[in-house]
Image (spheres, grey):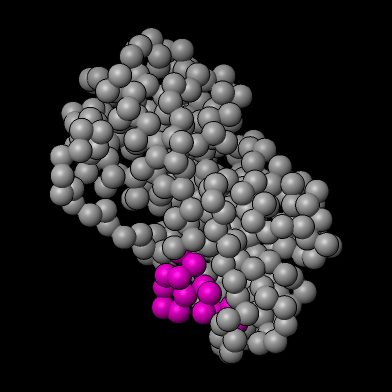
Amino acid sequence: MGGSAGLSLESLTPSPSPSPLTTKDPKTLSLSGRRIAFTTPPNYATRLTPLLHLRAATPLPVPTISVNPSSSTLSSLRSLINKGALDSFSALAFTSRTGISSFSLALSQSPLPSPPLSSSGEPFIVAALGTDADALHQGDPSLLSLLCPANPSRVRVRVPEVAIPAGIVKSLGYGFGRKVLCPVPDVIGLNEPDVVPRFLGDLELAGWVAVRVPAYETKWVGPHCADVLVELDGELDAIVFTSTAEVEGLLKGLDAVGWNWEKVKKRWPCMVVAAHGPVTAKGVERLGLTVDVVGERFSSFDGVLDALSSRFQD
């Protein structure tokens, strides 16, 4: 995520709007009246904000990073999706929804007919995490339909039971020297979290030849990113982090205005810090912050919100 201004991606991979609540589940409504800040990039915040509204919470977006494709990353992707360009690969592994969206955009901009996969050959695996896999089927035409239109059955989708990069490695099995293409972010102005390097290393240990391609850019949005938080007049019940890079971006933004995390905690001593899954939680704590709750179901944002709901019920 875990895993981002510029070109909007949500129009490429629209997520279904959450259904209105039909029952007053105590856990669901336990965020009623709570102000919840989150540092999620804008194109992911469009999925988190409605979920908070459904739980009667007051969302406070504090985006600290952007994740979007650039002309440079799209050019990198196009070099790998020309006619037959994927025939030397056995798998395509996505660790984020933005990677899927960026790859779809590059595919849709390529001249047709020029499918990157030939109609004949061994099954080609496409792996994605949790609800991100929905984006593989979205769009007209969809990413899956553009990969091998002459023989769609050649493409097989794998969605690991546990929605973390290590789950993808496990779902792919042993590689036997085969190649897997990994569209991942190019991190600019921030330290690259170890999630992607560890993922690529795990693939290599599992017998795969992991080929990294920059699919989009993860950037700090600048020194004013924490202004919304610093200028808040009122209570703040919780803050949700969905990636390690967001936290580094927030700390840089706080430093730019003469604040730090200790001052935030002093201002709102009862604020709960929530992380979207264990990978994010570990990254947050490596940056010196204490995480209070961790979403146990991290294939969607509902997991971290359920964890928050349970915390407030205790």
Q: Residue at x 42, y 70 (%)?
A: 138
The residue drawn where x is 18% and y is 28% is 33
- Image quarter hosting the C terminus: top left
Magenta run includes residue 142? yes
Residue 151 vertical position relative to residue 278 in the rendered view, above or below:
below
* Residue 72 falls left or right of residue 236: right
Residue at the image point whose x is 77% and y is 57% from the top: 174
Q: Is 54 or 11 nearer to us in this picture?
A: 54
Residue 209: image quadrant is bottom right
Note whether 38 is above or below 75 in the view shown. above
Residues 78 and 117: in front is 117
- How far across and how far down the image is residue 119, in percent? 66, 87
Task: Say if residue 309 shows up in the picture.
Answer: yes
Q: Is residue 62 visible?
A: no
Q: What percent of the width, then of the height, locates residue 247?
A: 51, 31
Q: Nearer the viewer, residue 284 or 233?
A: 284
Image coordinates of residue 66 in percent, x first then y, are: 48, 46
Which residue, as the protein is rendered here, is positioned at the far right? Answer: 177
Magenta part of the chain: 135-148
- Specify whether 47 is left or right of 133: left
Whether residue 147 is situated above or below residue 219 in the rendered picture: below
Q: Is residue 216 left or right of residue 123?
A: left
* Residue 48 lies in the magenta stretch: no
Residue at 52 percent across and 20 percent down: it is: 289
